[in-house]
Amino acid sequence: MRVLGTLIWRDLAHAYGFGGRGGSRRGGFVLPMVFFLAVPSIYPFAVGPDAQILGRTGGGMIWIAALLAAILPIDRLVTPDAEQGFFDQWAVRGIAEEWIMLAKIVAHWLSFGPPLMLAGVIAAGLLGLDAGQLQVIEAGLAIGTPGLAALGVMIAALTTGLKGGSALGGLMLLPLAAPMLIFGAGSVLQGGENGLLLLAAASLVLVALSPFAAAAAIRAMRE
Amino acid sequence: MGYGPSLAKSADAKDAYIRAEGLACVRGERLLFRGLNFACAAGQALQITGANGIGKSSLLRLLAGLLKPYAGTMEVKGALALSDERLAMDTHWNLQRSLDFWARLDGRGDTDITSALELTGLADLADVPVRYFSTGQRKRAALARVAASGADIWLLDEPANGLDTQSVVLLGTMMQRHLEAGGIVIAASHQPLPLENPRTLSLADYRP
């Protein structure tokens, strides 16, 4: 537990830039949040300010923005640590890669999930969604962002050491995130609340599988 | 995963050992060395010599459990610490904080960090971000990480590279003290190391 806590603390210190000077090296939590808010800000310019259209499509729009915001930091999740020899040092200490990846998933979620949920309130306001829709969106983000975090860490580990890994990572993430997008955006529609259950299932599968897949990727890279 | 629960520090460093029998290593479909045998008991140092590219670093990574041997067996008792060409520190953090991160993982305290900083002559640089370090200072920072880890077996890849004369003396003192405390030092180096009559293992003798 001490090991897990120390690993999570370090990744969080990178994301939020706390504890000592130097600030956050890896873009931090602000950039995904701004990115997430930029999409609903410009969306009305593209489709027009018609409240009915915005209300009907706004929920789906927020989910697309959340997905894109989750892709943003994946090239900073694993690659810098691999290049600087952190993974080798952890391996020499006998720390299982699965634990490291679990710590990375937890830290990554903490650095973009809650900020995204906060920004979701503003996004709902920008799109003129009602309180009921906002509630479903917030619940969906709370359930779905752990899955997106797990997926991000897994893809980051799989593309580490590849040339153009971040672009490839984005491409790999989109199809794998499609179920979450369908259930997440679907749950916002009228009478689609059951989508949340399917979203929870998809998220749970990703959280359960990702540490193992990411750990295997890191071990394979060493050979 | 590698072998041996290196997180649990052995209660008595005196019984640490590392043994290899018939080791062979293949990198990039090329056989680097084969039939390599050696054994190191507590308090012994081993210098691995050989030309560039002969497999010194690969042997150290093999012993550290980061590579799988192509053939042969290894037996390790005691915790390992590795210093290679990569620093494994967050370069925007200062040295104290970087060492503190590793000390927390190793279950070590502030006194271990302080003594490691003194051993490597880096006490004055403890609050300087690592990215401002010179080559020699980076090397010493990596050595400080090894010293603070409290591991029994030190695997050092070119520990004297980039060090000035004074730092080489510090390195010698540091290794000698570790050996006297019952530790093991295995160092790959193409230049002489500041050790009192270390055993040497020339990788050229094990080429296929």
Image: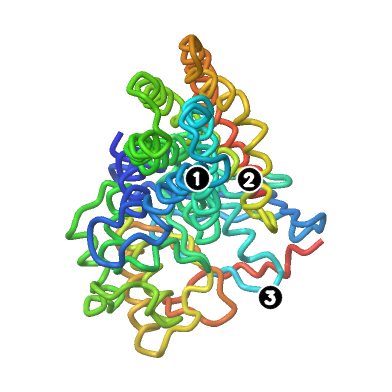
Amino acid carrying mark 3 in the image: Asn
Where residue B129 appears, x then y in whole percent? 32, 73
Amino acid carrying mark 2 in the image: Gly
Q: Is residue B15 visible?
A: yes
| Picture disc at residue B52 | 3
Q: CA–CA distance between discs 2 and 1?
A: 17 Å
Q: Is residue B1 visible?
A: no
- Classify B169 as above or below A6: below
Q: Which residue is mark 2?
A: A170
Where residue A178 appears, x then y in whole percent? 63, 28
Amino acid carrying mark 1 in the image: Val
Residue neighbourhood size for the residue with mark 1, other residues' Cα within 10 Å, grouped as few (<14), some (14–19), many (≥20): some
Front position in the image: A28 or A158:
A28
Q: Quadrant of residue B135?
A: bottom left
| Secondary element at image label 1 | helix
Q: Tell me what residue is drawn at x 49 percent, y 32 percent.
A: A54
Front position in the image: B97 or B34:
B97
Q: Nearer the viewer, mark 3 or mark 2?
A: 2
Are dots 1 and 3 on a single chain?
no
Residue neighbourhood size for the residue with mark 3, other residues' Cα within 10 Å, grouped as few (<14), some (14–19), many (≥20): few
| Secondary element at image label 2 | helix
